[in-house]
Image: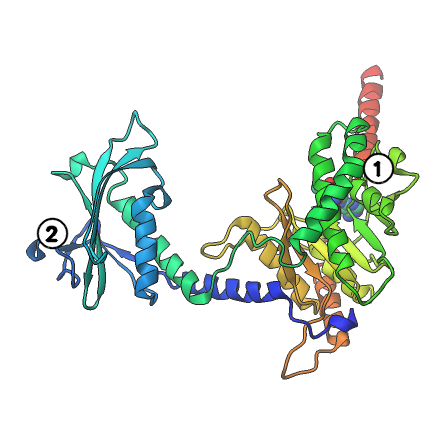
């Protein structure tokens, strides 16, 4: 790990951009005057309605955006209004006129609602007029009075248009931050080659011999994909010729451990509930039924895996740091905090709940001294973000010390001492239920 200490991960830059993007989004403070219209002079270039009838409906500070980008996004929306009008199912183009110099465009289209039985169609003209200070784009509904307009016009249309334009401008300024930025840590070609190879080798046999009640296809293809990604990541490290060792904490059915073991990676899986299929994997996979107390857990492997490991997820970086700064891979899932309880996620503007949780886990990773790196797995699950910790944070103005990071990891651990709610294993739950049943039966007989 030390060989990579000063490496700044490609995806870490992505996270910095994302933080800037979220900060910029929070400055979006539109004012709507739908219920008390304001009289205001029309912007330069706008021709409709006549100046004396101009009323202001909505106002927001804009983010500066260059003319070409503004025109491109307006054209995109003019050609595909479903991108900004959620209740619109499709649009048919009725007419388009463009001046010879291409600067002024007039598009007339019919908006077809999603709820055909409830909402009416709307003919709308989008008019682009270039002028010396820029470009004015008018969206003009072809109605005689407001009763002829569908319910979403103009309030929700304007809100959507405004917000999307603001966000889009922010993104243009900060740089594009792709949410599904796959292959940032693992080259796609390596991944695909490995995946096809593993699929050929194992998929049919695993699906045929699945003894769990769960859907074999879901698990087999998902774990083959995760194993392929891990193997590609590990193979890209040329600093060692030895295959790294691993521990899969909260390994569930143990399939990932089995595939990695078959591929020559030495490691083990721990889960508090053993699974029927473990006996099928036992020749290759070391699987242990044990409830991990994350506060005391230490491992002696190169990589810790926390794949949808529920309560263990936020603990993985802490366990890794306390175990001598091991590397780790986390695929976050449900929103557990350090006590094991589900957390309330305070999402930032423009962020999903899952995105907020990933940010929380990334913040723990940083506190423990690691540079969080992120990628997206090619799996059907929507919870497909993978966070990697394999490099220690470095900074220009201070020498970061492992002892400081270790202290931070211990402090996090201590902050929830005696407050951790460990799961009760399924076997113990059924044992308790059986005992209760027996007690009830005994009481009835007495
Ligand atoms: C959602 S499942 C995921 C299983 C597997 N990693 C997968 O992706 O298929 C989470 C697993 O974490 C295990 N787990 C949660 N807390 C644990 C603990 N403290 N010790 C051991 N296992 C735990 C559960 O038993 C469960 O099997």
Q: Is residue 376 visible?
A: yes
Quadrant where the N terminus sits is bottom right
| 267 sits left or right of 191 in the view | right
Quick one: which residue is furthest to the bottom in this view? Answer: 397
Residue 393 is marked as none
Q: Element at badge 1?
A: loop
Label 2 CB sits under 8 Å from any ligand 1 atom: no
Q: Earlier in the sequence, mark 2 or mark 1?
A: 2
| 261 sits left or right of 415 in the view | right
The image shows residue 281 at horizontal and vertical percentages of 87, 37
The image shows residue 287 at horizontal and vertical percentages of 87, 43
Measured in 3D between alpha carbons, the distance from the residue under mark 2 to the one under mark 1, in whole angstroms, is 71 Å
Protein image colouring: rainbow
Q: Element at badge 2?
A: loop
434 or 410, which lies in front?
410
- The residue singled out by tag 2 in the image is 49
Quick one: which residue is furthest to the left in this view? Answer: 52
Query: Quick one: label 2, few (<14), some, or many (20+) residues within 10 Å?
Result: few
The image shows residue 98 at horizontal and vertical percentages of 21, 51
Quadrant where the C terminus sits is top right
Quick one: which residue is furthest to the right in this view? Answer: 283
272 or 230, which lies in front?
230
Q: Tell me the quarter of the picture where residue 400 sits.
A: bottom right
- The residue singled out by tag 1 in the image is 274
Point 87% across, 49% down: residue: 264
Q: Tell me the quarter of the picture where residue 69 sits.
A: bottom left
Q: Is residue 29 visible?
A: no
| 289 sits left or right of 10 in the view | right
80 or 34, which lies in front?
80
Query: Quick one: label 1, few (<14), some, or many (20+) residues within 10 Å?
Result: many
Point 18% across, 68% down: residue: 132
Point 32% across, 62% down: residue: 68
């Amino acid at each position: 790990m030390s060989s990579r200490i000063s490496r700044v991960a490609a995806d870490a830059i992505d996270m910095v951009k994302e933080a800037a993007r979220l900060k910029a989004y929070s400055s979006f403070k539109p004012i709507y005057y739908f219920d008390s219209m304001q009289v205001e002079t029309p912007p330069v270039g706008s021709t409709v309605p006549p100046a004396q009838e101009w009323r202001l409906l909505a106002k927001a500070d804009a983010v500066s955006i260059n003319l070409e980008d503004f025109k491109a996004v307006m054209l995109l929306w003019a050609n595909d209004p479903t991108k900004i009008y959620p209740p619109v199912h499709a649009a048919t183009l009725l007419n388009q006129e463009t001046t010879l110099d291409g600067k002024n465009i007039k598009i007339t289209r019919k908006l077809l609602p999603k709820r055909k039985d409830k909402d009416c169609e709307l003919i709308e003209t989008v008019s682009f007029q270039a002028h010396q200070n820029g470009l004015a784009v008018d969206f003009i509904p072809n109605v005689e009075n407001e009763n002829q307009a569908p319910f979403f016009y103009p309030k929700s249309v304007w809100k959507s248009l405004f917000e999307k334009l603001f966000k889009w401008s922010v993104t243009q300024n900060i740089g594009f931050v792709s949410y599904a930025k796959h292959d940032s840590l693992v080259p796609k070609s390596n991944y695909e080659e490995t995946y096809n190879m593993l699929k050929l080798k194992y998929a049919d046999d695993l699906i045929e011999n699945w003894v769990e009640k769960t859907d074999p296809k879901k698990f087999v293809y998902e774990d083959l994909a995760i194993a392929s990604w891990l193997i590609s990541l590990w193979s890209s490290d040329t600093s060692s010729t030895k295959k790294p060792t691993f521990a899969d904490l909260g390994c569930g059915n143990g399939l990932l451990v089995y595939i990695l073991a078959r591929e020559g990676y030495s490691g083990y899986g721990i889960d508090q509930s053993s699974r029927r299929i473990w006996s099928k994997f036992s020749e290759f996979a070391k699987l242990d039924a044990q409830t991990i107390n994350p506060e005391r857990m230490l491992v002696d492997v190169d990589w810790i895996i926390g794949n949808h490991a529920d309560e263990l997820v936020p603990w993985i970086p802490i366990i890794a740091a306390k175990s001598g700064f091991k590397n780790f891979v986390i695929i976050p899932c449900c929103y557990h905090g350090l006590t094991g309880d589900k957390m309330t996620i305070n999402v930032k503007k423009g962020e999903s709940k899952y995105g907020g949780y990933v940010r929380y886990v990334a913040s723990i990773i940083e506190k423990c001294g690691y540079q969080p790196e992120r990628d997206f797995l090619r799996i059907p699950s929507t919870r497909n973000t993978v966070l990697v910790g394999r490099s220690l944070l470095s900074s220009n103005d201070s020498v970061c010390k492992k002892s400081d990071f270790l202290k931070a990891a211990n402090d996090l651990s201590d902050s929830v001492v005696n407050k951790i709610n460990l799961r009760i294993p399924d076997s113990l739950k059924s044992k308790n239920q059986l005992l209760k049943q027996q007690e009830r039966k005994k009481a009835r007989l007495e």
